Image (spheres, rainbow, N blue to C red):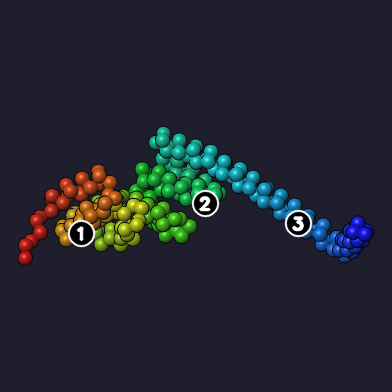
Amino acid sequence: MAELFSEVDEELRREQLRKVWSRYSGLIVGAAILIIVAVGGWRGYQYLQAQKAAQAGSAFEAAAALADQNKHAEAEAAFTKLAATAPRGYRNLSLLRAAAAAAKRDPKEAVKLYDAIAADGGFSGAERDLARVRAAGLLLDTETYQNMLQRLEPATAPEATFRHTARELLALSAWRANDTAAARKWLDMISADGQTPSSLRSRAEALQALLPPVAKS
């Protein structure tokens, strides 16, 4: 008797499935096709992205080789061309390298390129700070301390990646401007930061020794 009931139940389930398939077969097949197309499209997208990354990597290596050969104008042009079509990572790195190549032949042009990077929200905070520091390094001998402060102060924050170099540049700029108080401020920040590289700390101590002693009250 139990077997009979099982057979009846099985037949009912088959009948229900036939009705569902009859009513919704088009939707089911359509959904399956959409899933297959979506998966295929995603795989295709991943393949194209991998191809683009490989091509960008090869182009970047070629441009870097030009820079290593001191062909700075050619390297700058190659990096700039690559940045126009490369994925974001290679784009950002290429623009930074283009500015570095420009610095070898035309520091003023390089400063413009670095300033454009520092103002571009498509770069990470660390990349923008690097651009600020590189531009300030090119301007150290000619820019006023106040202008250097305006450029570099955002890069001196406690968690900023390039804060050590930014502080050193500001200390040097203040020292050149005979602003002893500002120079001491940045040198003290360098000394107080436990993560300051030893070589930079030594340079800061040497500059600190050149400052007049603090007046006693």
Q: Which residue is mark 1?
A: 185
How many marks are shown on the rendered structure?
3
x, y (%) of residue 138? 31, 50
Of labels 2 and 3, earlier in sequence is 3
x, y (%) of residue 33? 78, 55
Residue 205 horizontal side relative to residue 89, left or right: left
The secondary element bearing badge 1 is classed as helix
**Residue occupying image coordinates x 13% and y 50%:** 210
Q: Residue furthest front?
A: 1
Q: Are marks 1 and 2 in contact (CB under 8 Å)?
A: no
What amino acid does circle 1 point to? Lys
- Frontmost of labels 2 and 3 is 3
Please tell me how crowded label 1 is: few (under 14), some (14-19), or many (20+) other residues with Cα within 10 Å.
some
Residue 30 horizontal side relative to residue 145, left or right: right
Measure how far apart labels 2 and 3 are at the Cα level: 30 Å
Placement of 46 over or under 214, stated as above or below = above
Quarter containing the C terminus: bottom left
Q: Which residue is mark 2?
A: 88
x, y (%) of residue 208? 16, 51
